[in-house]
Image (tube, rainbow, N blue to C red):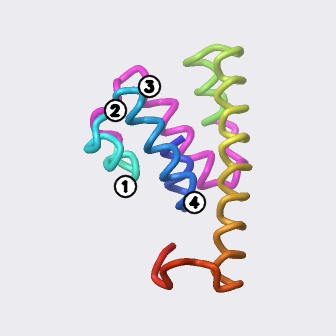
Amino acid sequence: MLTVTQVNRCHYCAYAHARMALAEGLSHEEIESLGRGSFEGVPQAERPAIRYAQHWAAADGLPDPQAMQELHDRYGEDQAAAIELSLRLIRVGNLMGSTWNKLVRRLGLARNASAP
């Protein structure tokens, strides 16, 4: 979630996902690292999925077929399909959050003019 949101730059989602990550036991440092696009602290078994998520988001949901095949080979069909579905859902949320943010700013409803 944090990796896709970092690429898509949705400030609302970044806040929400950071809160969820804290609740799941990630440290502030781990969350900030993922927010910067770094994989420090990510367990080795999860790094391929995180790299794929970053690639997927940067490619606007159209990943390189070889990257997709590597995901399927690494995690199996069911888990890879679950990862893909999660990525799509996160992207939809990011797009809605970013759209809402732009609308709020355009209408002058933001409390702080320097807010994202």
> What residue is shown at x 44% (from left), y 44% (from top)?
18
For the residues carrying marks 4 and 3, which lies nearer the camera in this image? 4
For the residues carrying marks 1 and 4, which lies nearer the camera in this image? 4
- The residue beneath circle 3 is 46
First in sequence: mark 4 vs mark 3: 4
For the residues carrying marks 3 and 2, which lies nearer the camera in this image? 2
User: For the residue marked with disc 1, what is the amino acid?
Assistant: Arg
First in sequence: mark 3 vs mark 2: 2
> What residue is shown at x 59% (from left), y 27% (from top)?
70
User: For the residue marked with disc 4, what is the amino acid?
Assistant: Cys
| Mark 1 Cα shell of 10 Å, populated few (<14), some (14-19), many (≥20) | few
Please give the range of residues in magenta. 39-66
Distance in Å between CA atoms under marks 2 and 4: 20 Å
Give x and y (percent) for residue 13: 57, 52
- The residue beneath circle 1 is 36
The one of 81 and 21 positioned closer to us in this rendering: 21
User: For the residue marked with disc 3, what is the amino acid?
Assistant: Glu
Q: Is mark 1 on a helix, strand or loop?
A: loop
Please give the count of numbered marks on the rendered protein: 4
Residue 29 left/right relative to 51: left
Give x and y (percent) for residue 30: 30, 40
| Mark 4 Cα shell of 10 Å, populated few (<14), some (14-19), many (≥20) | many
- The residue beneath circle 2 is 26
- On residue 10, the disc is 4
User: For the residue marked with disc 2, what is the amino acid?
Assistant: Leu
Residue 19 figure quarter: top left
| Mark 3 Cα shell of 10 Å, populated few (<14), some (14-19), many (≥20) | few
Distance in Å between CA atoms under marks 1 and 2: 15 Å
